[in-house]
Image (cartoon, rainbow, N blue to C red):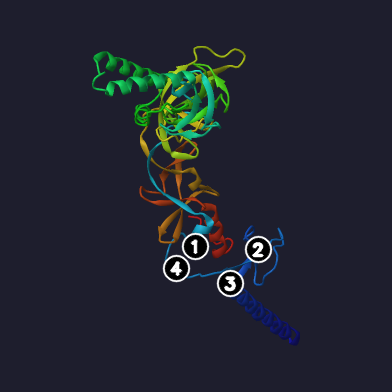
Amino acid sequence: MKQILISTILFSILIVSGCKNGHENHQAISGSYYTCPMHPSVVSSTPGSCPVCNMSLIKVEKNENEHAGHQGNFITIDKRKQELAGIKTDTVKLRNITSASTIIGTVAIDDEQVKTISSRAKGRIDKLFIKNTGAFIKSGEPLYSIYSEQLQADEKEYLSLFEKSKTVNATTQLTKELAGAAKNKLLLWGLSEKQIFDLEKSGNASPLITFYSPEAGYVTEVNITEGMYVQEGSSLLKITSLNQVWVEAQLYSNEVSGIAENKSFKVFSESNPEQIYTGKLAYSNPVIEEGKRIYLLKIRVNNPKGNLIPGTLVSVVPEKSSASVLAVPKSSVLLEKMKTVWVLAHENTFEQRMVVTGAENKYWIEITSGLKQGDVVVTEGAYLISSEFILKSGAGQRHEH
């Protein structure tokens, strides 16, 4: 009997001690604790290293009453932390999502937009203002200055007739006609009205004649250097406008059916998926390229802002009528045990919601349940918010709802 009594006392002491230790550990974890950012299940009351990956443990301040009364998963992140984490949001709205297969295309220069600048006269290129390809030049900017004896002689001829036309005694209809013909000759050489006006004002023929760009565009070819002699009609430069471009898409023979017959296509780039361009089929290869099994489509796309740069890969889909659906960027949807998104509940507070998805393309995904139009979802940094939520709430504290 005495032995049983001693055993009972010892067991009671162990229970009390265990409860006390457990209470102390709980207090340490519920107030603040240290955990691994890569392995949230590692929890310690003191700083140190993670036994799994050897990373330094970080301190976590836990506030259990932070979202008391709320159902679901909530987390509050101040503005500064949001900026550091690069968190971005977008509004849920109706978008057209087609289920048609996406074709990869390449932006190319439209040959009709290429302007070849040729030499109007024989002479020596004395000054070249554009020396490298790729430069953007505005309409009216100087391209090159040329020394041409022929041009200089025609300038002198015009000045002589112009001065005679101003003399009252010598002014005749014939003189006016000769002066007008001489002026037209200078215009045909490529001189502008302003250049001729400056010539009349100065009264001296310049040995160097400067020629200006007839339109804006990118310099895609430079065939001359300073000091080079050129003949009349020699190709000097090529300027290309990007107001209109081609999108070249290649299809395999088994993909041609049902696609080549489409006359309109939607084009969008990865850098700006919100911007959708509409293109018209300009060329359809009538035959499969021998030995390649490739069918070539060329789609002409208006590009007024010049955002589609030649060489860029773009996505092309046949234009089809489709109903508008609620959609969000694919980066918003987290594929964990279930599909979830983080929604901005109110200022600095985010709520995790489970969603059901439908049709999707490369950039957008339809939301059939879990969100409504006007909700603001996290598009970048969603995984960081999930990690922060796990650290603050403790491993295994997430509500699966």
Q: Is residue 174 left or right of residue 293?
A: left
User: For the residue labelled by badge 4, is the local secondary structure a helix, a strand or a loop?
Assistant: loop
Between marks 3 and 1 in the image, the one whose residue lies nearer the viewer: 1
Residue at mark 2 to residue at mark 4: CA–CA distance: 25 Å
First in sequence: mark 2 or mark 3?
A: 3
User: For the residue labelled by badge 1, is the local secondary structure a helix, a strand or a loop?
Assistant: helix
Q: Which residue corresponds to the image point at 49% horizontal and 62% vertical from the top-left?
A: 80
Q: How many marks?
A: 4
First in sequence: mark 3 or mark 1?
A: 3
User: For the residue labelled by badge 2, is the local secondary structure a helix, a strand or a loop?
Assistant: loop
Amino acid on which disc 1 is placed: Arg
Q: Nearer the viewer, residue 261 or 40?
A: 261
Residue at mark 3 to residue at mark 4: CA–CA distance: 18 Å
Considering the image in quadrants, where does the N terminus appear? bottom right
Residue at mark 3 to residue at mark 1: CA–CA distance: 21 Å
First in sequence: mark 4 or mark 1?
A: 4
Q: Residues within 10 Å of mark 3 (few under 14, many from 20)?
A: some
Q: Which residue is mark 2?
A: 42
Amino acid on which disc 2 is placed: Val
Q: Which residue is mark 4?
A: 68
Q: Which residue is mark 1?
A: 80
Between marks 3 and 4 in the image, the one whose residue lies nearer the viewer: 3
Residue at mark 1 to residue at mark 2: CA–CA distance: 27 Å
Amino acid on which disc 3 is placed: Ser
Q: Which residue corresponds to the image point at 24% horizontal and 14% vertical from the top-left?
A: 173
Q: Which residue corresponds to the image point at 65% horizontal and 72% vertical from the top-left?
A: 45
| Marks 3 & 1, CB-CB < 8 Å contact | no
Residue 205 - label: none
